[in-house]
Amino acid sequence: MKTLCLIATLSLLPLAPVYAHETAPSEKINVLQEKMLKNLPGNKAMMLTVDYAPGQSSVAHKHEGTAMAYVLEGAITSQVQGEPATTYKAGEFWYEAAGSEHLVSKNASSTEPAKLLVFMVMGKDEAVLIPLKN
């Protein structure tokens, strides 16, 4: 009986969601176009945008293909293994060789959104992003 009373009492309390192990939502990736390349059989080109909320970052990752990134809005801090972290502002760009390990990719601002335009060339079955293991 005591157990039933306790359950009934607890059911009346307002419950707040608990997210002890939940991670922040990831960046928003939007594929604008994807086309097979006639002059490079077995390869494709992709154009996509990456939107970061204020303070948001990507997991450390690598790209199997070559990537070129252009900052459309805000500022992005990027670091590829072996290179220093660099912050790029709207209108600036960088290149990542195929297989590069992208250790840092984040919105440099904690108050403003940021957006990238990315152009990639990769094998037809290669992944856009592969998370790195710790």
Image (spheres, rainbow, N blue to C red):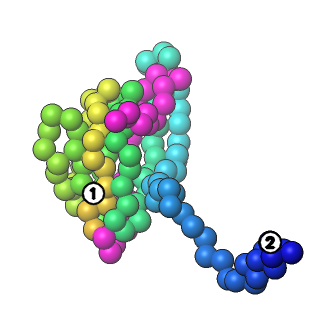
Residue 62 x/y as whole percent: 35, 33
Taking the spot 81% from the left edge, 76% from the top edge, the residue there is: 2
Report whether 19 appears left or right of 12: left
Q: Is residue 64 visible?
A: yes
Q: Is residue 95 visible?
A: no
**Closer to the camera in the image, 24 or 93:** 24
Residue 119 sits above or below residue 15 on the image: above
Query: Which stretch appears magenta?
Result: 110-134
**Closer to the camera in the image, 113 or 23:** 23
Residue 15 sits above or below residue 35 on the image: below
**Mark 1 nearby-residue class (10 Å; few <14, some 14–19, many ≥20):** many
Residue 75 x/y as whole percent: 26, 62
User: Mark 2 is on which residue type?
Assistant: Thr
Marker disc for residue 92: none
Residue 65 x/y as whole percent: 38, 28
**Closer to the camera in the image, 14 or 1:** 1
Number of numbered tags placed on the structure image: 2
C-alpha separation, residue under disc 1 versus residue under disc 2: 54 Å
Residue 87, quarter of the rendered image: bottom left
Marker disc for residue 3: 2
Taking the spot 68% from the left edge, 82% from the top edge, the residue there is: 14
Q: Secondary structure at mark 1?
A: strand
- The verdict on residue 29 being magenta is no
- The verdict on residue 112 being magenta is yes
Which residue matches tag 1? 76
Which quadrant of the rendered structure holds the C terminus? Answer: top left
Taking the spot 76% from the left edge, 77% from the top edge, the residue there is: 6
**Closer to the camera in the image, 13 or 121:** 13
- Residue sitting at the far right: 1
